[in-house]
Amino acid sequence: MAENEPTVTWAKAQPVLEVLANLAGIRDVLVIGSVARDGFGNDLDVVLTVSQPVYLAYLAAVNQALLDADECDYWDDFYVGFSSQRFEAALASVSMSLAEHGWLCLALRYLDAKIDVQLMPATWLSNTDLAQSQLPHHDPSFVANIAADARKLAIKRGERGQRVVTGLGRKAVSSKK
C-alpha cells in the first residue's frame, strides 16, 4: 500500500462503529473528519455522545492523564499525542463489559488503523460554545469545526434488539448558542 493511500474505508470502519453504537451509555455515534467527508481516510475520527455525568468523568480522566504525563506540551499533546489516552478514558467512562471489550478489540484489529474518539455531552451540537468551554483545547473553533463535519450513523434495530449500522446519515446540524 502506498504511503499516503487511505487505510480506512467505510466498510472497514463499520464493524468498529457498530460495536461503539451498542455500548451501554452511548446515545449517538457520529463520524467526523475525512471518513465523514469523503468516505475514506488515514484514520477514523468518532464522537460518542453521552450523558453529562459520563462526559465529566471522561474529561477528568483525560485531564489527569495529561497531568501525569512527563514533559508534555499540554495544548498540542491533548489532541496529537494523547489519542490513545482519550480512547482509554472514553472506554473506561462508558463502563464496557468484558464481552464488549472483546468485540471492540476484534473490530479494531480488522480496522488496522488509528482511531480517535472524543466523548461529548448529548447537547454538544446545539451548544458548541458550551462544549468548547468545557474542553481543554487551544483552538477556539475546534468543537464548531468538528460539528460541521459530523455525520450521525444511520441505525436500525436488529432481530435481537441490537443496533445495526446501515450507513452514514446526513450531516448533523449545529447551531452555536
Image (cartoon, helix red, strand yellow):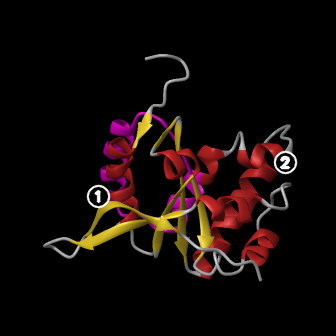
From mark 2 to mark 1, how far is it between C-alphas? 34 Å
Across and down, in percent, residue 76 comes to: 81, 44
Asked if residue 78 lies left or right of residue 96, the reply is right
Range shown magenta: 87-116
Indicate the secondary structure of the residue bearing disc 1: helix
Asked if residue 61 lies left or right of residue 48, the reply is right
Q: Residue at x 63, y 48 (%)?
A: 85
Q: Amino acid at mark 1?
A: Ala
- Prevailing SS of the magenta stretch: helix
Across and down, in percent, residue 25 comes to: 45, 75
**Residue tagged by mark 1?**
99
Residue 166 marker: none
Residue 74 marker: 2
Q: Residue at x 46, y 72 (%)?
A: 28
Asked if residue 72 lies left or right of residue 16, the reply is right
**Displayed quadrant of residue 22:** bottom left
**Displayed quadrant of residue 177:** bottom right
Q: Residues within 10 Å of mark 2 (few under 14, many from 20)?
A: some
Asked if residue 28 lies left or right of residue 55, the reply is left
